[in-house]
Image: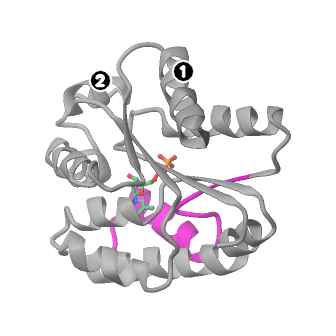
């Protein structure tokens, strides 16, 4: 995939993905790299529909899976591939590993979800899994468990965390513990960046 660098940040809600994604983008910019920072679901039409559904009532499982796949196809074609071909650093806050986790939690087989995605979605050079115990994640997002919306329920998150951790042995994966301060977590991520380049 060109000369770009493709980094994906994953993890359950409450692990601080978006903050760390922004900080990582800033770090690459300070190194003189051109960075594209993006997220899934995207702000495109399919992504907007799934975001809406979190508030207005969740989509049926099949429909939800299709929407995430459609959103990603568009993201890959319109943003990810062109940016990588242009030699940029692409940093994503969530990607198809989230589909394996969250739609896996809705009953689909994570391995088949992975195959369907890898038919069109390039693998990242580096997958950073921000990890945290589910109890701590729920505390961070201010949820006690009984008031959580569908996406945030404890069992879902337990399932999702396990799917993410099942990717730990892939050569491109680094598991980053997110206990401690934001700065400590950023430090852990940046030391992985340095290790990756040398
Ligand atoms: P998130 O990035 O957490 O959105 P926000 O910043 O608005 O909280 O993503 C929203 C939810 O979408 C999150 O709970 C995970 C879910 N999701 C899936 O279920 N499947 C997917 O493929 C992706 C990318 C996200």
Q: Secondary structure at mark 2?
A: helix
x and y percentages locating residue 13 in the rendered image? 37, 41
Q: Nearer the viewer, residue 96 or 195?
A: 195
Residue highlighted by disc 1: 187
Precedes in sequence: disc 1 or disc 2 = 2
Q: Is residue 47 magenta?
A: yes
Q: Residue at 38% of width from left, 26% of height from top? A: 178
Image check: 89 left or right of 143? right
Q: Nearer the viewer, residue 93 or 197?
A: 197
x and y percentages locating residue 148 in the rendered image? 26, 41
Residue range in magenta is: 36-60
Quadrant of residue 82 in the image? bottom right
Count neighbours of disc 2 (C-alpha within 10 A) and say few if under 14, some if 14 to 19, many if 20 or more: few
Q: Residue at 24% of width from left, 37% of height from top? A: 147
User: Where the N terminus falls, by quadrant?
Assistant: bottom right
Quadrant of residue 39 in the image? bottom right
């Amino acid at each position: 995939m060109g000369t770009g660098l493709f980094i994906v940040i994953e993890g359950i809600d409450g692990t601080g993905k978006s903050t760390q994604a922004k900080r990582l983008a800033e770090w690459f910019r300070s190194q003189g790299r051109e960075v594209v920072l993006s997220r899934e679901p995207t702000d495109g039409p399919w992504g907007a529909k799934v975001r809406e559904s979190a508030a207005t009532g969740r989509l049926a499982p099949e429909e939800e899976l299709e929407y995430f796949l459609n959103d990603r196809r568009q993201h890959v074609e319109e943003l990810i591939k062109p940016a990588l071909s242009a030699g940029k650093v692409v940093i994503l806050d969530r990607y198809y590993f989230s589909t394996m986790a969250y739609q896996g939690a809705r009953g689909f087989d994570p391995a088949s979800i992975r195959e369907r995605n890898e038919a069109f979605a390039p693998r990242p050079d580096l997958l950073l899994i921000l990890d945290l115990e589910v109890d701590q994640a729920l505390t961070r997002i201010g949820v006690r468990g009984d008031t959580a919306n569908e996406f945030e329920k404890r069992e879902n998150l337990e399932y999702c965390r396990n799917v993410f951790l099942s990717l730990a042995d892939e050569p491109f994966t680094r598991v980053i513990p997110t206990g401690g301060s934001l700065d400590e977590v950023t430090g852990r991520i940046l030391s992985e960046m340095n290790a990756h380049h040398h």
